[in-house]
Every structure is written in C-alpha cells, then in structure tokens.
Amino acid sequence: DGGITQSPKYLFRKEGQNVTLSCEQNLNHDAMYWYRQDPGQGLRLIYYSQIVNDFQKGDIAEGYSVSREKKESFPLTVTSAQKNPTAFYLCASSMGTGINQPQHFGDGTRLSIL
Amino acid sequence: GDSVTQMEGPVTLSEEAFLTINCTYTATGYPSLFWYVQYPGEGLQLLLKATKADDKGSNKGFEATYRKETTSFHLEKGSVQVSDSAVYFCALSDSHKAGTASKLTFGTGTRLQVTL
C-alpha cells in the first residue's frame, strides 16, 4: 500500500538540541510539505518542496530547516533557534503542482520539550 | 490574503442526527475547496473536494457544495454515527502563480462528538 510514513511517532527534545523528523513517501509524488499543528489551531505551513533539490519557506519557517535530496524523502530539522517547538508535526505530499491536487498526510510526529 | 473560517466547536450530536459544519472562505483567485478529517492521534484524511463553483463533493455520506456567491463550503451529513467523531478541517488551495505547489490554507478545525 502506498502512503506517507512519519517517524518517530513521539519525540523529545532537550533544550539547545536539534532534532530531525523523518518523512518518507512511496506515492511517487513530486511535491511534499511540512505543517505544524497546535491545539485549537489549524495547520500552518513550515516548508514545502515541489521537486528534488528545491524547497521554499512557508508561513512559519524560522527555526526550522529541510532538505530534499531524494524524491521520496523530506526530513525536517527543528533547530535550537525554534523557541516553542512543542507541537504536532504533519508531513504531506501531492501528485504535482496545481490547485486541484489534494494533499495526502502522514500520521504525524508529536514533539515535546524535556 | 487567503483565509478560511469555520464554526467553533465542539459540536455534540446524538447518533442519527443531521450535521452541518459551516465554512466560509476569502480568496483572491478561484480556489479549490477541501474537507479533511482527523481522527485522534492521526494525520488528516481527505474527505471530499470541489474544484469549481456549484460543484458538489461527496464521500461516505458527507456532502459539501461550492457556493461562489456566498463564498461557502458547508459540510453536511444526513445521519451521523459515533464513528464520525473527529475533527473536521475546511481548506482552500489558491495558487496565484502558475506552476507553484498547491499550498493549502486551513480553518481552525471543528470537533464533532457523536453520542449514542
């Protein structure tokens, strides 16, 4: 079955530490996205990538970094510069560009600060 | 900029009741509209979509009609079940630039709780 796999499901970060969240898809989708979800709020876009070796900042990119070295992988690093990283992080992908393309989501990673 | 406004929850209904979750939007172009559902501890699943005015999206008994004149995309279901308890998100995709990725703008979500 094709889908998006996010790991780990739960992640704990110490103060001053960088952590990396994994996102892998086997849907052969070109575009991939990272969102942050906070309680009582909608999803906010952190970064997105339309093709390999290319990515753009979303609405809340500060304190985060990404890479897109392979089509199927789009890892997100939460750096120590992100002062309020506790949230639920969702990765998504879509077939291609265009406003009619729905996004498919992984099951998320919940990040907490120790 | 683009925005999506959903009715505040939680919405609590008895099983077999009629459901309406209101959604209105603001967009500069001609957006596509989506409803996503999130079950506890999971990611979002696409529930239905509509890509142009007067289109009706439907899936699993849920329906929503793209109303351009009222900029609305209300979600309805005739008879809810306990298994429909989840958070529902309305979203729009409005790419202003040809060839750019389909970025979504989400509402804040509406929690639905269905009781026996």
Image: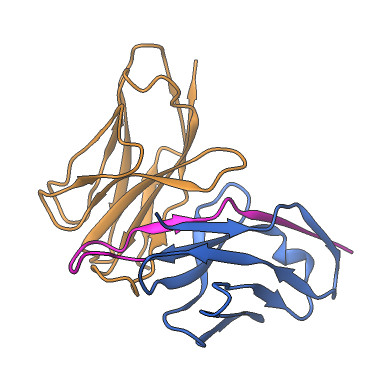
How far across and down, in percent of the image, does residue B22 sit? 67, 66
In the foreground, B19 or A114: B19
In the foreground, A59 or B35: A59
**Left or right: B10 as drawn, with respect to A29:** right
> Which residue is found at the position 66% from the left and 55% from the top?
B110
How far across and down, in percent of the image, does residue A61 sit? 30, 36
* Chain A: drawing colour: orange
* Span of residues in magenta: B94-116
In the foreground, A19 or A45: A45
Does the magenta segment cover residue A6? no
* Chain B: drawing colour: blue
Q: How did the renderer colour the structure?
A: by chain
Does the magenta segment cover residue B100? yes
> Which residue is found at the position 42% from the left and 64% from the top?
B27
The correct choice, above or below, for A18 with respect to B43 in the image is: above
**Left or right: A89 as drawn, with respect to B38:** left
Q: Quadrant of residue A62?
A: top left
How far across and down, in percent of the image, does residue B70 sit? 58, 75
Q: Quadrant of residue A14?
A: top left
